Amino acid sequence: MAFVSLPRSQTTVAVSTRIAGMFANMKTAIRKRRMYRKTIEELSALTDRELNDLGLCRSMISDVARTAVYN
């Protein structure tokens, strides 16, 4: 088993960097979730005819929203 021993000052920087990264990831995840919900909300507000014009049906809304936001 291998491990790395760092001086205390470098360890503190690494931990604070990881914590900052964790909060940045959470912020990104929250922003994407909001966009996903907004996309579903807007597509759900369309009539069946409008969805058909886009080549969609109601059962496809969540898949389309997921693809639009997360890919």
Image: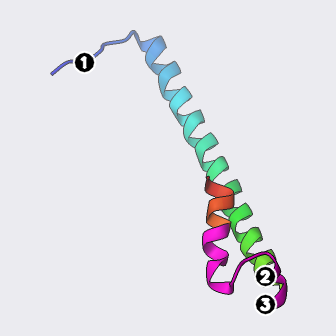
Residue 47 visible? no
Quarter placement of the N terminus: top left
Residue 8 quadrant: top left
Residue 5 quadrant: top left
Residue 2 visible? yes
Q: Kindly identify the amino acid type of the residue bearing the numbered disc 2.
A: Leu
Q: Which mark is residue 3?
A: 1
Magenta highlight range: 48-64
Mark 1 element type: loop
* Mark with earlier residue (2, 1): 1
Neighbor class of circle 3 (other Cα within 10 Å; few <14, some 14-19, many 20+) is few
Residue 68 quadrant: bottom right
Residue with the mark numbered 3: 48
Query: What distance separates the C-alpha of mark 2 from that of mark 1?
Result: 56 Å
The spot of residue 36 in percent (x, y) is 69, 65
What colouring method underlies this structural image?
rainbow
Task: Please report contact status of discs 3 and 2: CB closer than 8 Å, yes or no.
Answer: yes
Query: What distance separates the C-alpha of mark 1 from that of mark 3?
Result: 59 Å
Q: Nearer the viewer, mark 1 or mark 3?
A: 3
For the point 63% across and 61% down, which residue is it? 67
Q: Which mark is residue 57?
A: none
Q: Kindly identify the amino acid type of the residue bearing the numbered disc 1.
A: Phe
37 to the left or right of 49:
left
The spot of residue 7 in percent (x, y) is 39, 9
